[in-house]
């Protein structure tokens, strides 16, 4: 009996680890490591102080960060022809190497790099996030093709809150005395998470069941609880000086909340495990449960087999929206042009605002600890924006047939309000701005990827969403370096205030007033472009966008009936 019980327990553990819901959990945890992108305002101050950089130089490094974190075309193309583990290994190696070299340089363990070398280091380190990001997002969207807005919202939400989670882990492990250790944590923690969890990310297809949406909402509730706890934890850290034990206790509770999705995965797999034991051929059902699916037919594949003509004449012979576009057909379409234009202006200005938040706080007289809280709040409300936009836009699209670009446009408008709070500050306005900009930018992110998947299909999704997001860093460069950085330095030169160890410094509301007015105008333009796209696609979104995925069945109904209410009732009884 003991051997039988042990073998059944082992079989159940293997089923959990191989299941779809554990794959979702693994994706969420690995996405936390990509949140290092949004902690740049914290460690950029260390770089500025250590190397005596001007604000223009720091903003140029901000562009390097944005460029690196958005150049994922190589990862997208490689994902078309290689298994996902290749992308994870490359990403883990690149992440550790890049951030470790940055840490060595700012702690003077290696020779001081020249500015162009630091630019390359920041770009190289932040580019590592694209490898895991591409592998996780593409696999998850294909595993849940008719819940893509929701799964993208959750995954990108954990990227948003990742910066706040890593900041709490940094305080628990290293304390708050040496900010350079934050960069060291960036080097080893995300790489370690990838190496432990990446085998769980792979295509897993089973019959869709009616409780799937309910499980996603449960994951959402747990995630919201996590974000609320971190929010109140950061507020407490702002009011009270924590001891090291206090930091450790807060981070420990965060880790406990991060593990709750494992319990949800175990519950779902336990129901399935018991159902499989009740079937006539449980071994067959179990063996089929988590195997890789056959290649899914698209509507084009179901007709005449595709013969590859010369790709250039075929660029202008585009399929209907929602069908599978080739890369060139999508890139040269009017819809993609509008998406890239809105991303360039709206997302680019949002990135520029986030990158300069630490310097804005310094110019307005906020303490270093308050600036750290602001950065964490951006990360936390970035999470709220991402998960809520994913769920809300999905509901508006499926239930009310509203175009998803319409929600995208409102996200730009929200961000615009936050930027105006910085351009025309009042007491406490920076805290409101951090909340609004974090939420607005977070809401933009998953909708960009969802809109691209809906309009151009999933066949070339890994490359196309990386093409779409590439516009953001170039918009960030123009607005960050040529607008924010240069206007700040002009104001600082007018004050003639150069502080040793801090570079060119400006104090007062005028330092960023004009530049953030420009950022707000650029974001407003992005909203207008998205309204145009929503108008163009209104008929498309009135149809069933997911019709090609609603009837897909990988396991015959006779071999496994999924979550029948009567069977579930018998199990619970």
Image: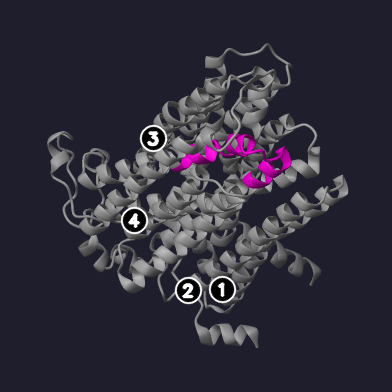
Q: Nearer the viewer, mark 4 or mark 2?
A: 4
Q: Position of residue 453 (x, y in %)?
A: 34, 52
Q: Upstream in the sequence, badge 1 or badge 3? A: 1
Counting other residues with Cα less than 10 Å from the Cα at mark 2, is it few (<14), some (14-19), or many (20 or more)? many
Crowding at dot 4, Cα within 10 Å, few <14 / some 14-19 / many 20+, comes out as: some
Residue under numbered circle 2: 560
Residue located 71% across and 52% down the image: 234
Which callout, 3 or 4, points at the residue further toward the start of the chain?
Answer: 4
Tell me the distance, in whole angstroms, between the alpha carbons under discs 1 and 3.
53 Å
- Tell me the residue at 69%/17% (across/down): 500
Q: Earlier in the sequence, mark 4 or mark 2?
A: 4
Judged left or right of residue 366, residue 87 is: left
Give the residues drawn in magenta, as a range. Answer: 350-374
Give the alpha-carbon distance from disc 2 to disc 1, as whole Å: 7 Å
Q: What number is the disc on residue 341? A: none
Residue 136: x and y in percent read 50, 48
* Whole-number angstrom distance, CA of label 2 to CA of label 3: 50 Å
- Majority secondary structure in the magenta region: helix
Dots 2 and 1: beta carbons under 8 Å?
yes
Q: In the visual, does 418 lie left or right of 178? A: left
**Discs 2, 3 touching: Cβ within 8 Å:** no
**Which of the two marks, 1 or 3, is nearer to us in this view?**
3
Which residue is the site of mark 3?
475
Q: Give the residue at mark 1.
A: 276
Residue 193 location, x and y as percent? 65, 43
Give the residue number, with chain letter if any, for mark 4. Answer: 296
Q: Is residue 202 above or below residue 357?
A: below
Secondary structure beneath label 1 = helix
Q: Which residue is more in the foreground, 319 or 535?
A: 535
């Amino acid at each position: 009996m003991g051997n039988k019980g042990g073998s059944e327990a082992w079989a159940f553990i293997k089923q959990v680890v191989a299941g779809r819901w554990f794959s979702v959990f693994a994706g969420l945890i690995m996405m936390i490591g990509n949140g290092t992108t949004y902690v740049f305002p914290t460690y950029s101050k260390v770089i500025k102080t250590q190397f005596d950089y001007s604000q223009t130089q720091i903003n140029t490094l901000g562009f390097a960060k944005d460029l690196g974190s958005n150049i994922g075309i190589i990862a997208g193309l490689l994902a078309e022809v290689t298994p996902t583990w290749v992308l994870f290994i490359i990403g883990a190696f690149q992440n550790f190497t890049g951030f470790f070299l940055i840490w060595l340089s700012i702690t003077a363990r290696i020779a001081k790099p020249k500015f162009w070398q630091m630019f390359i280091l920041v770009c190289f380190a932040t580019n590592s996030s694209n490898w895991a990001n591409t592998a996780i997002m593409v696999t998850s969207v294909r595993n849940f093709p008719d819940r893509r807005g929701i799964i993208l919202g959750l995954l990108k939400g954990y990227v948003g809150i990742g910066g706040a989670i890593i900041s709490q882990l940094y305080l628990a492990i290293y304390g708050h005395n040496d900010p350079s250790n934050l960069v060291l944590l960036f080097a080893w923690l995300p790489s370690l998470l990838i190496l432990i969890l990446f085998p769980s990310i792979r295509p897993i297809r089973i019959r869709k069941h009616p409780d799937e949406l309910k499980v996603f909402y449960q994951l959402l509730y747990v995630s919201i609880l996590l974000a609320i706890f971190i929010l109140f934890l950061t507020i407490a850290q702002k009011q009270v000086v924590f001891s090291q034990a206090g930091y450790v206790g807060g981070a420990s509770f965060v880790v406990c909340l991060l593990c709750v999705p494992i319990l949800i995965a175990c519950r779902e797999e336990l129901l399935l495990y018991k159902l499989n034991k009740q079937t006539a051929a449980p071994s067959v059902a179990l063996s089929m449960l988590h195997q890789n699916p056959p290649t899914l037919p698209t509507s084009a594949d179901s007709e005449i087999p595709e013969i590859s003509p010369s790709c250039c004449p075929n660029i202008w012979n585009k399929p209907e929206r929602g069908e599978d576009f080739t890369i060139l057909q999508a890139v040269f379409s009017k819809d993609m042009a509008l998406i890239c234009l809105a991303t360039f202006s709206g997302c680019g200005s949002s990135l520029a605002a986030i990158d300069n938040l630490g310097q804005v706080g310094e110019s307005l007289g906020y303490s270093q600890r308050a600036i750290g809280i602001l950065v964490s709040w951006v990360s936390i409300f970035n999470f709220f924006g991402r998960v809520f936009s994913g769920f809300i836009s999905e509901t508006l699209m499926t239930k009310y047939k509203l175009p998803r670009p319409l929600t995208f446009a409102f996200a730009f408008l929200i961000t615009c309000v936050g930027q105006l709070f910085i351009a025309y500050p009042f007491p406490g306005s920076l805290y409101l701005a951090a909340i609004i900009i974090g939420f607005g930018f977070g809401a933009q992110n998953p909708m960009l990827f969802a809109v691209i998947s809906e309009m151009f299909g999933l066949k070339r999704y890994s490359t196309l969403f990386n093409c779409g997001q590439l516009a953001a860093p170039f918009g960030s460069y123009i607005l960050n370096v040529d607008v924010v950085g240069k206007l700040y330095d002009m104001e600082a030169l007018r004050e003639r205030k150069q502080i040793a160890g801090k570079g060119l410094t400006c104090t007062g509301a005028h330092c960023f007033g004009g530049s953030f007015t420009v950022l707000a105008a650029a974001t407003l333009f992005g909203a207008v472009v998205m309204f145009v796209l929503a108008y163009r696609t209104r008929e498309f979104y009135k149809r069933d966008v997911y019709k090609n995925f609603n009837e897909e069945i990988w396991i015959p109904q006779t071999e496994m009936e999924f979550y029948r209410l009567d069977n579930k009732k018998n199990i619970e009884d």
